[in-house]
Image (cartoon, grey):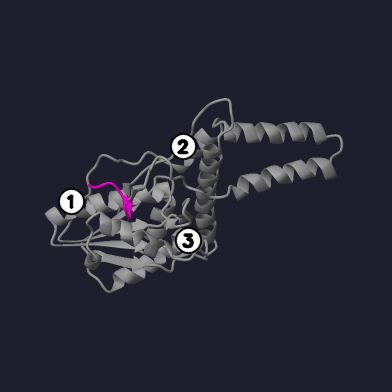
Amino acid sequence: MQPLRRDSKLVDLSRKTYVTPFKLILFTLLALFFAAIVLWKRARRPLAVCTAALFWLLAAGWLTVPLLHLAQPRWQTDTPARFAPRTAIIMLGGGTVYDDDHVLVPPRDVLARIMASAQNYAACKRAAAICHVIVSGGNPQRHRATEADTYLPYLLRQQVPRADIVLENSSRTTYENARNVSAVLEGSRYDSLILITSAYQMPRAMLDFHRFGLAPQPMISNARRAHLGVLPRYDNLVSAEIALHELIGIAQFHVYRAIGWF
């Protein structure tokens, strides 16, 4: 495989990060802080200390590690995909970011998904008659292009022909990924489905795809790791936010399923 490129510039996987505001963590910490100031005068100092301690434990990785462990179960990553005469490789989106030149590009985690999709496509073409890559991702961030459209050139540069790529560019959530892809698959007859995404998204993605009667083979493109230490790290906060987002999403799925919404 050739390295991913944007025009003549090499996309450095080590420098691109999954840039997302850690809203949930920030909101929780601020809520605790203001509760200490406004409601409990006697508890101000203990709550302020607890808030600072919680922030440090997340940013230094000590709480992020167990959160990632819960969000990323140990999937079998060394088992090769099983290809059939008609195979669809489904790649889930994971946002878009602007680089230093203000060009919309895939985040680091998505670059790993693109590479995994291209590699599985190449292996599929050696074993199957028909191989398609379905790229699912709309524009939840309201950037100037959808996820699927942004990822397309990267797949083309990895020798995936445009004729074998199907773009689903309207979904905004993992649930909508599954719903919209199931609609795409209704008019096609595939013998095998392969789902490619990051380890933290795979548990929720499998729940959603099973909800629509689909049982794809899970193929992990990458996993997130926390960096333990003393000094706070932004990457650890981002990983904690991602893990919490997925765990809450799984809980939400089961609640909605129990009350009949899913």
Mark in the foreground, 3 or 1? 1
Task: For marks 3 and 2, give the CA distance.
Answer: 22 Å
* Label number found at residue 123: 1
State the residue in front, 47 or 232: 232
Residue drawn at (41%, 47%) of the image: 108
* Left or right of 223 in this view: 234: right
Helix, strand or loop at label 1? It is helix
Name the residue type under label 1. Answer: Ala
* Label number found at residue 237: none
How many numbered marks appear? 3
Q: Residues within 10 Å of mark 1 (few under 14, many from 20)?
A: some
Pointer 3 or 2: first along the chain: 2
Taking the image as drawn, is residue 123 in sight? Answer: yes
- Residue 248 at what x, y percent from top left? 55, 50
Dominant SS in magenta: loop
Mark in the foreground, 3 or 2? 3
Q: Residues within 10 Å of mark 2 (few under 14, many from 20)?
A: some
Q: Residue beneath label 3, please? A: 173
Pointer 3 or 1: first along the chain: 1
* Left or right of 137 in this view: 79: left
Residue segment shown in magenta = 1-8
Pointer 1 or 2: first along the chain: 2
- Residue 102 at what x, y percent from top left? 48, 56
- Residue 158 at what x, y percent from top left? 25, 54
State the residue in front, 163 or 220: 163
Q: Residue beneath label 2, please? A: 69
Name the residue type under label 3. Answer: Thr
